[in-house]
Image: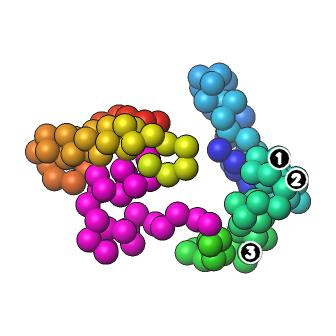
Amino acid sequence: MLLVDMPTVAEFLYSAVKVFMDPVTVRKVNMVKAKDMPDIAAALCGAGSPTAEWLVSAVRMENKPGVLPQLPESAPVPVHVQVAKGMTLPEVIAAAASGPGASTASADAAAAAVATAGAGSAGGAGATAAPIAGGL
């Protein structure tokens, strides 16, 4: 997790709380300055990648709620758009799992895991959580 330009008070509170946190979790949290974001994004995503460019533009934008830069053309279609077009959640997950480098078996396993989890929930959508096969 990247925390960009954290206020001093938040940095102080985090430093006080992190001594009680699991070391693995502490290693996952990184505080960075916005001026360093181009180098960090290039290191994480590859120099010139659409994701790196999006991260840098998001950090440089005016800080207003709900305002983000346009996603690159290579970005996957958001889940809510796919569901609005009539796809079921298992179909959306299966499509994502069968993307580049994924096997059909992992896509089928992901769809089955979501279908099974949804069938067993007594409280409706989101009532139960199940691990998704295939590393999603």
Q: Quadrant of residue 64?
A: bottom right
Circle on res. 61:
3
Circle on res. 19:
none
Looking at the picture, which amino acid does disc 1 mark? Ala
CA gap, disc 2 and disc 1: 6 Å
Secondary structure at numbered mark 2: helix
Left or right: where does residue 23 sit relative to residue 110?
Answer: right
Secondary structure at numbered mark 1: helix
Camera sees residue 39: yes
Compared with residue 86, is residue 8 higher up or lower down, i.e. above or below? above
Q: Are marks 2 and 1 in contact (CB under 8 Å)?
A: yes
CA gap, disc 3 and disc 2: 17 Å
Of mark 1 and mark 3, the one earlier in the sequence is 1
Looking at the picture, tell me which residue is in the foreground, 118 or 59. Answer: 118
- Pointer 2 local density, CA inside 10 Å: few below 14, some 14–19, many at least 20: few
Looking at the picture, tell me which residue is in the foreground, 62 or 125. Answer: 125
Left or right: where does residue 71 sit relative to residue 38?
Answer: left
Location of the N terminus by quadrant is top right
Camera sees residue 32: no
Q: Return the x and y of residue 30 as percentages of the image width and height.
A: 73, 41
Residue at x-position 13% and y-position 40%: 120
Residue 19 drawn in magenta = no
Looking at the picture, which amino acid does disc 2 mark? Asp
Write the start and end of the magenta stretch as one range.
74-97
Q: Return the x and y of residue 51 as percentages of the image width and height.
A: 70, 60
Of mark 3 and mark 2, the one earlier in the sequence is 2
CA gap, disc 1 and disc 3: 21 Å
Compared with residue 117, is residue 88 higher up or lower down, i.e. above or below? below
Q: Return the x and y of residue 119 as percentages of the image width and height.
A: 14, 44
Label 2 belongs to which residue?
A: 39
Label 1 belongs to which residue?
A: 43
